[in-house]
Structure formats: C-alpha cells, structure tokens
Amino acid sequence: MADFNAVAGHERIIKSLRESIKNDMTSHAYIFCGNKGSGRNLTAGAFAKTANCLSPINGNACGKCPSCIQFESGNNPDVFYVKATKTISISVDDIREQIVNEVKIKPYSYKRKIFIIDKADTMTSQAQNALLKTLEEPPKYVLIILIAENTENFLPTVLSRCVMMKFSPISVNLIKNYLINNCAMNEDDAAFYAEYSIGSIGEALRLSGDENFYQMRNDIISCLDRLDTMDFVSAMFMAKEMEKYKAYSELFDIMYMFYRDVFCMRLFKDDRYVIQKDKIGLIEKKAKNLNEQTIAKRLDFIMDIKKKIRQNTAFRLSMEVLFMNLKES
C-alpha cells in the first residue's frame, strides 16, 4: 500500500512532501533520485496518492476516499505511469504521446493530473527537450515525478526546473530493525541481510528471498578458503569458475564482507562483531592465520578490482589479478 508511513527512513523528505500537501504548496515537478530499492518508488506512490486524496489527514492520504481507493486498485484516472514503449530508453515519442498530448486536458476527476516517470534518467535528450516546455509552463493542475538512479543524464535545463529529492542509503541499524519488526526475522539474519543491502530495504528484502544468493555466497567463501592452500594454476582455474557470477553485483560484496568479519575477529577476538555467524568456524581459523596487515591488503585488493570492473575492465583478467594478489599477500 502506498503510504508515507510505510516508508522507512528519509524523514526529512517525507516531512517536506507532507508539509507541501498540507499547505497546498506542491511544486509542479520533482526528481526522486536514489538507488533501486531505496524507497523512492514507494515515496512517489505515496506522494501521488496523497496529492489527490479528497480528505488528507495531516499530510497523509485517508485511504478511504474514491481517489485513494482507485489509486490502490491502479485505476485512478488522473495518475499516469510513463514508460518506454519501444526501446530501453524513454523516447521523444513516449513523452509526446504519454505526457505532452495528455497534459493539455484537465484532470478527469480530481485536483491534480499526476505523471510518474520511472527510469527517467533513460530519457533521450530529445525526450527531455519535449518535456521541457511542460516543465517551463506547467498547467496549475499538473504534478510530474521523475524517478532516477542518478542525475548525470539529465539536461541542466530539466534539473533547474525540478525540486530535487535525494534518497541516500539508509543506516544498517534502521534496515536491521525494519526486518526484525516487519518481516519476523531473527536478529542475526536481519543483521546479515542489512549489511549486504547497500543501504536499501528493497535490496535487503530481495536478497532474503533469493536462494541463489545464499548458494553463491557459500561458493565464493569456499573459494576464498581454498585459495590460500592451492597453487597458482589452480587459482587461475578458480578465477575462470567465477565467471558464472559475473552478472551478480554482490560478488565482491561477499568477498569484502568475509574478510571484514575475519578482520573484526582478529582485532577484537569476539564474535559479537561478526556478521556471518554461520561461518564463524572458518572466520576464526582465518583470523588466527592472517595478520591485520594482510587482511587489510586483501580488503583493498577487492575494492580496487570492484572499481575496475565497474570501469569495464575484462572480468576474467580482473579475477585472475585479484586471486594472485590475494595469494601473494
């Protein structure tokens, strides 16, 4: 259900949006910018629902009026979800057909005509220019919400005509508490998924329901365990095996989290600081065999290779370099 109360974190953003509705001072256009799963889509839905609610209560949707009921059923006649229709990018034709032509018509039933553009950062330059006139001279009844992962692809003229709302990563503790309180998860599991969530409740929920993630984690940690005792040829073959996880962004996070736990165990000699408690035996063994300097080097190697992969360095070669560095450290 789209509701401001369902959004975890981002208190400042939620307060600002609520106040704008209470005081009837909403802007005509907003950019909700943040990582996938950060709460930006949920907030956009809550904002759209509340903006057309017939009986809002302190900036919150009532959930009972015809507008709220139609919104939740996906049938609100004055809320439009703009998306790409022919390619992965939102084209000029998409903007003209779904916004420019529609915006000229007054709302069918409620106060505002609301356009939610998901993946707005995929709009072509031509599409953004087509949207610009509406942003420059919007009818009073129009509300446009652009949802994006970053702002690099937006034209400066588009950015300057929108209110920016940045959805920063949520704290690990907040995510952990959310999982405990809302998902009936025990504290250890909640801490585990919160650490892997990159500041996103949506990502934590996705990982907790992904059996492949757990198997991948076990495989990767097993490889790291065997790496210290195998020869270089075997290590290169193991680097080749890692190609099956090439598409998974969590690959290097798993490696980093493992050595982070080893470092904490070595430093504090206390499993209270260990996230992956199901691997405590292996973590204790590594903590005894590796000194702090070696573990710190390995953490640096992993982060360096992760950065290079993002810059499109060849995956297989990068993994070979990483495994050689881990062995030699």
Image: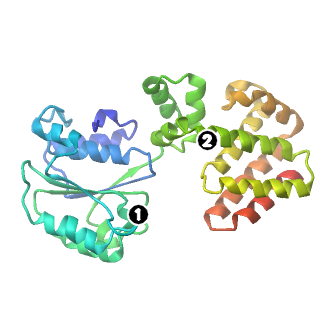
Q: Nearer the viewer, residue 306 or 272?
A: 306
Question: Is residue 19 at least partly visible in the picture?
Answer: no
In this picture, residue 298 sits left or right of residue 52: right
Which residue is located at x 34 percent, y 76 percent? 125
Mark 2 is on which residue type?
A: Phe
Question: Is residue 247 at least partly visible in the picture?
Answer: yes
Q: Residues within 10 Å of mark 2 (few under 14, many from 20)?
A: some
Q: Quadrant of residue 81?
A: bottom left
- Residues marked 2 and 1 touching at CB (< 8 Å): no
Q: Is residue 32 above or below residue 289?
A: below
Which residue is located at x 43 percent, y 60 percent? 150
Q: Report the disc number at residue 213.
A: 2
Which residue is located at x 77 percent, y 58 percent? 240
Mark 1 is on which residue type?
A: Thr
Q: Secondary structure at mark 1?
A: loop
Q: Report the disc number at residue 151.
A: 1
Which residue is located at x 66 percent, y 52 percent? 245
In the image, residue 35 lies at what x, y percent?
Answer: 46, 51
Q: Nearer the viewer, residue 255 or 217?
A: 217
**Which of disc 1 and disc 2 is earlier in sequence?**
1
Q: Quadrant of residue 193?
A: top right
Q: Is residue 38 above or below residue 9?
A: below
